[in-house]
Image: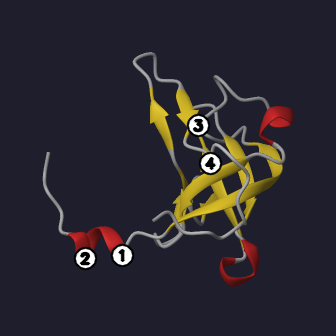
Amino acid sequence: MAEISWDEFEQVELRAGTITAVDEFPEARRPAWKLTVDFGADTGVRRASAQITDLYSAEALLGKQVLAVVNFPPKQIGPFMSECLVTGFVQDDGSVVLAVPDQPVQNGLRLA
């Protein structure tokens, strides 16, 4: 594992946001949801593609708070532009468990 400096870590903007919309993504190569995530007034609303269909239904995701990287450049995923990276833990079977706050927090709060 490569080490990074504290300054490099501080450049990563990991922020809490609430999923406000979940859409199907039939064009994706691997099953995925298109998420709309509200990160509060300063960061705003961002969209993300997330391969989390194994463990999460659209209904279960709506209103869920997540932790996402918001300062990556946008990434084209098929016909969809992903504007943030929702984080999670990839298990041995390939399913992803979302990284989430264990209590509600204000949208936009930065992971410290």
Q: Nearer the viewer, residue 112 or 13?
A: 112
| Lateral position of residue 75 relative to residue 20, left or right | left
Expressed as whole percent of the image width and height from the top left, the position of residue 68 reads: 55, 57
**Label 1 vs 3, first from the N-terminus:** 1
Asked if the residue under mark 3 is in contact with the one under mark 1, i.e. CB atoms within 8 Å, the reply is: no
- Residue density around tag 4, few if under 14, some if 14–19, many if 20 or more, within 10 Å: some
Residue 74 appears in the rendering = yes
Residue 101 - label: 4
Asked if the residue under mark 1 is in contact with the one under mark 2, i.e. CB atoms within 8 Å, the reply is: yes
Q: CA distance from mark 1 to mark 3?
A: 25 Å
Expressed as whole percent of the image width and height from the top left, the position of residue 21 reads: 84, 52
- From what the image shows, is residue 33 above or below residue 44? above
Classify mark 1: helix, strand or loop: loop
The amino acid type, in three-letter code, at marker 4 is Pro
Q: Nearer the viewer, residue 99 or 101?
A: 101
Residue that extends furthest to the left in the rendered view of this protein: 2
The amino acid type, in three-letter code, at marker 2 is Asp
